[in-house]
Image (spheres, grey):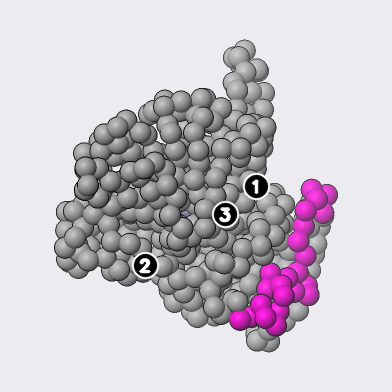
């Protein structure tokens, strides 16, 4: 059996790992899109490294676009197999992939206008909304912990890894000549103290582990510290400076966590009455899907729901759907909090809020998530004094604050704790993926110091026989 590492190799987006069995069956673990590499991204996304029509199954760890975003492209180009994932992942893919199709159509349209001026022919989008909708026909969803038979010899079981709603570790068992090989693909590993979701659950003993390493060199703040910091930032911005607080946040997970945190702070009486807007149709839809999947919630959240039927709603909070209402927020003079997507600030309505607010020192931009290099978010995060939004240059005068602890990715101690359910002596090999190379070297060292052995950092395209 062979694993080929095709994406999110020594970087954090574009997750794709191809398994080919001795019988020639091809399973693709995740089908993620590369994000945030400017013009290179499109070329990288079109160069899959495999023929879609030859893939029998796609096993999807979770719905984030850097793990699922190329599914419509692959289906459009001949994939005719089955996509297996959890129920919540399927529901989230229904909204996230269509949204991605909309972005592809929009960006290509803008790009083609420029090309037309230069006399160049128009390009096709990577895929359209229609392609994304068609791709949903291929999905089959399974509950956590249930064994799904791919063939007589191969089975898959999803275990909850607490990263986002529906996210999972993929546990594969291959049976050949009476011998079992067990492979776990951890997917993205969540936090130990997520405000809403369950703690990452132990997974069955594996012989081979493909694991993420995003924060392999970092330790996050504890949750209570982040609550305190969030309160400080809100008070400083909205009470002392009387400004606007812009929180760019991923539609799935981060938005609901920030909303719920503000809800808790208000309940405790730690915040004055401030208007809060969630301005993203996608975030509104994602919040509705979240409400439908309490199977992923932790006990604290389930207990709360016994007395509070909607933890994602409170007085002073408005969910904004229409474009007109979104634009109207630009005219608000009073202090307020605007939570808007996308988290990396490359797309979505957050861009017009940034354009409107970034040059006023009264305002604050609060970065609550990872931004891959070369995104607008990364430039704002690292403190650039001038940034370009919609092709116009803006001086950054607003305060920029970073709150790392809302990350949906565990830090290296949390990732190691997640792996500690395994008998280390039984692991034949660990492959590190989904991390920058320097970070991976650091994480590899930490793992070795904790008696994990045979750790490999594969190169892009590398094939390993197991
Ligand atoms: Zn993820």
Which range of residues does the magenta coloring cover? 303-326
Between 27 and 269, the one lying in front of the other is 27
Label 1 to label 3, Cα distance in Å? 13 Å
Identify the image quadrant of the C terminus.
Answer: top left
> Residue at 75% of width from left, 69% of height from top?
317
Query: Residue under circle 2?
Result: 202
Q: Residues within 10 Å of mark 1 (few under 14, many from 20)?
A: some
Task: Name which of mark 2 and mark 1 comes first in the sequence.
Answer: 1
Q: Look at 65% across and 43% down and name the residue there.
A: 99
Residue that numbered label 1 is attached to: 95
Task: Judge left or right: residue 111 versus residue 179.
Answer: right
User: In the visual, does 109 lie left or right of 178?
Assistant: right
Determine the image quadrant of residue 153. Answer: top left
- Sequence-first disc among 1 and 3: 3
Instruction: Give the quadrant of residue 316.
Output: bottom right
Do we see residue 179 in this rendering? yes
- Residue under numbered circle 3: 87
- Pointer 2 with pointer 1, Cβ within 8 A: no
Task: Give the side of residue 382 with respect to residue 316, left or right.
Answer: left
Whole-percent x and y of residue 8?
A: 38, 44
Residue at the extreme bottom:
269
């Amino acid at each position: 059996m062979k694993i080929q590492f095709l994406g999110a190799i020594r970087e954090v987006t574009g997750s794709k790992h191809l398994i080919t069995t001795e019988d020639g069956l091809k399973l693709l673990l995740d089908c993620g899109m590369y994000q945030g590499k400017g013009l290179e991204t499109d070329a990288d996304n079109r160069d899959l490294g495999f023929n879609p029509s030859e893939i029998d199954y796609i096993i999807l760890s979770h719905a984030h676009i850097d793990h699922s975003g190329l599914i419509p492209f692959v289906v459009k180009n001949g994939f005719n197999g089955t996509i297996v994932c959890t129920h919540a992942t399927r529901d989230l893919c229904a909204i996230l992939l269509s949204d991605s199709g909309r972005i592809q159509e929009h960006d290509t349209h803008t790009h083609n206008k420029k090309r037309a001026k230069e006399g160049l022919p128009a390009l096709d989008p990577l895929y359209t909304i229609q392609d994304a909708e068609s791709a949903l026909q291929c999905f089959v969803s399974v509950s956590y912990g249930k064994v799904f038979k791919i063939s007589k010899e191969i089975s898959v079981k999803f275990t909850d890894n607490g990263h986002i709603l529906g996210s999972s570790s993929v546990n594969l068992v291959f049976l050949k000549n009476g011998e079992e090989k067990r492979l776990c693909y951890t997917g993205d590993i969540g936090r130990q103290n997520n405000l809403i979701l369950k703690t990452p659950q132990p997974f069955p003993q594996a012989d081979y582990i493909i694991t993420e390493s995003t924060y392999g060199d970092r330790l996050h703040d504890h949750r209570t510290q982040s609550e305190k910091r969030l309160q400080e930032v809100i008070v400083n911005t909205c009470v002392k400076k009387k400004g606007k607080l812009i929180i760019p946040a991923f539609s799935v997970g981060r938005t609901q966590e920030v909303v719920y945190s503000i809800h808790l702070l208000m309940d405790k009486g730690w915040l004055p009455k401030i208007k809060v807007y969630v301005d993203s149709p996608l975030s509104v839809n994602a919040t509705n899907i979240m409400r439908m999947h309490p199977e992923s919630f932790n006990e604290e959240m389930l207990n709360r729901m016994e007395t509070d039927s909607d933890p994602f709603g409170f007085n002073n909070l408005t969910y904004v759907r229409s474009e007109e209402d979104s634009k109207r927020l630009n005219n608000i003079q009073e202090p307020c909090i605007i939570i808007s997507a996308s988290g990396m600030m490359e797309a979505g309505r957050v861009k017009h809020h940034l354009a409107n607010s970034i040059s006023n020192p009264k305002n604050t931009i609060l970065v609550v998530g990872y931004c891959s290099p070369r995104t607008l978010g990364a430039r704002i995060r690292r403190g650039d004094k001038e940034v370009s939004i919609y092709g116009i240059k803006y001086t950054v005068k607003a305060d920029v604050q970073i709150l790392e602890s809302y990350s949906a990715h565990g830090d290296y101690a949390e990732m190691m704790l997640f792996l500690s359910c395994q008998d280390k002596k039984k692991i034949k090999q660990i492959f590190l993926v989904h991390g920058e190379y320097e970070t991976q070297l650091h994480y590899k060292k930490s793992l070795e110091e904790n008696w994990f052995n045979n750790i490999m950092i594969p190169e892009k395209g590398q094939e390993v026989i197991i």
